[in-house]
Image (tube, rainbow, N blue to C red):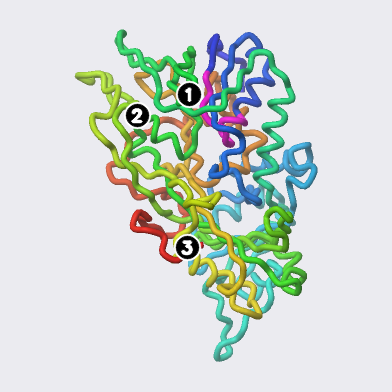
Amino acid sequence: MSTQTLPQPSSILLLGNGVFSLSTLYHLLSNPSYASASITLLAPSFPHPSSASQDHSRIVRSDYARPAYSRLAARAHCQWRSTHWGHEGRYSEAGLVLTASNQNGYVEGSLENVKTMAGAGSVQVCNSPAELRDVAGLPSAQLSDGVEADEELGKWGYVNRTAGWADASKSMAYLYSLIVKGKHANLTIIDDSATHLLTDTSGPTLTITGAQTKSHGPIYAELTIVATGSWTPSLIDMSGRAECSLQPIVYVRLEDTEAQALENVRTVLNMDTGTFLMPPKIFSEAEGGGTWLKAAKHCKGWRWEADVAAEQRVKIPEADNSSSMPVKAESLIKISVLPAPPSGKVYPPAPASAISSLLSFLTSLIQPSTPLSNRPLKSRLCPYLDTPTGDFLVAYPPRTEGLFVACGDSGHGFKFLPVLGEEIAGVLERKQVRVGEDDWANIWRWRDKVPVWRGTEDGSRGAEGGVLNSGWEGAI
């Protein structure tokens, strides 16, 4: 990108402590141009246990059907593999097997892009379930009437041997330590959360002047950056643009012989169903010890619906000729949120139906000697902030001053951690795009509302989902 074309604000209020927020903060603090700006990070105590980035493993891949994301992921992947970002056990390289049962444009596009990014020698196409099992390090499937029963795995796909996974919790803790240890004189960290954004409607344009906190009163800033992930719709009306979906994760404890047999298993992601398997992970004694296997879904997702009070949400004007300044929503709005965990739980658990589906997936892949339903299990819900296209939403909302939004992970944001903050800052500063560069300001723009919300439709999601408010019968 070219040199900066927008002067920095004298004061910045940054909301959130996830991937988008902390990566942006790290980049701003590393840029001498912001040394004179007063920067306040407003976020609950780090780490927030229910944050999407608080997990043992996240896939690191350049396997995208869209070339721009594949290129950005390849840049991030180089950082994970070759620099401090991946040191001290934060990154492991096990490879990724991307599969499908039918013709799948996402897998086909990813295959072509990853050949360019990782090199054709790192990729092997597989045309049968037996080949997929072999390259994935999975045991041979049990036969039924002479036919391999492998609907869960998929019928074709490819292996990208250079892909890996990162320990998300460790990586976020490392990033936070870099920020804190930097002892930046212009940074203030406030352990609190915003109840709503502060507005000024005295002029011709809606202006955001800061945020009201739960315990520290109002905090004012020339620029407020909202990077609050799945909590963003509780502060800004994101109707038709972004919505929280809840994705189930399950961990199953392996027997010692299984852990040894699966020691070299690769990540497996079925792009028809959105179901995936991560390599085994040894848990600390505080976590219960032993070796655990993780499976999760990347699908339409589940909703937990809650009413949000009118004064909590800012509504962005939709047109220049609006007859009024719609600052607040007019009534209670029902939105999808991450529910509070039940008493005694750290995370909200996954619904019983999703756990059953994930156990069936694992059973098909690893062929356990005893039923997985009889094993020690852990489950949780991972919150995404989905957009209709799967693109991130990083933009100055139109017809609004003093506000910048960085959110819309759509379930694939973590892998970009080492490079995401730089690109967000480029959009923030309205830097000009050079020839040959990807125009992230356009890709991540504030888009028109979709008339009917159908979730993320980028070709990467399974179809499962629902509404959870009726309860989690049988959830663990």
**Disc 2 from disc 1: Cα separation:** 19 Å
| Secondary structure of the residue carrying numbered label 3 | loop
Specify few, some or many for label 3: CA neighbours under 10 Å numbering under 14, 14-19, or 20 or more: some
Counting from the top left corner in percent of width and height, residue 326 is at 26, 23
Going by the numbered disc 3, the residue's amino acid type is Ala
Task: Return the residue at label 1.
Answer: 215
* Nearer to the camera, 398 or 350: 350
| Secondary structure of the residue carrying numbered label 1 | loop
> Magenta stretch?
13-23
Task: Return the residue at label 3.
Answer: 475
| Secondary structure of the residue carrying numbered label 2 | loop
> Which tag is nearer the camera, tag 2 or tag 1?
1
Q: Residue furthest bottom?
A: 145
Circles 3 and 1: CB atoms closer than 8 Å: no
Going by the numbered disc 2, the residue's amino acid type is Arg
Which image quarter: residue 156? Answer: bottom right
x 62%, y 31%: residue: 23
Would residue 443 be counted in the magenta stretch? Answer: no
Tell me if residue 54 comes above or below residue 6 in the rendering: below
Quarter of the picture holding the N terminus: top right
Whether residue 430 can be seen here: no
Q: Is residue 365 left or right of residue 340?
A: right
> Which tag is nearer the camera, tag 2 or tag 3?
3
Task: Return the residue at label 2.
Answer: 313
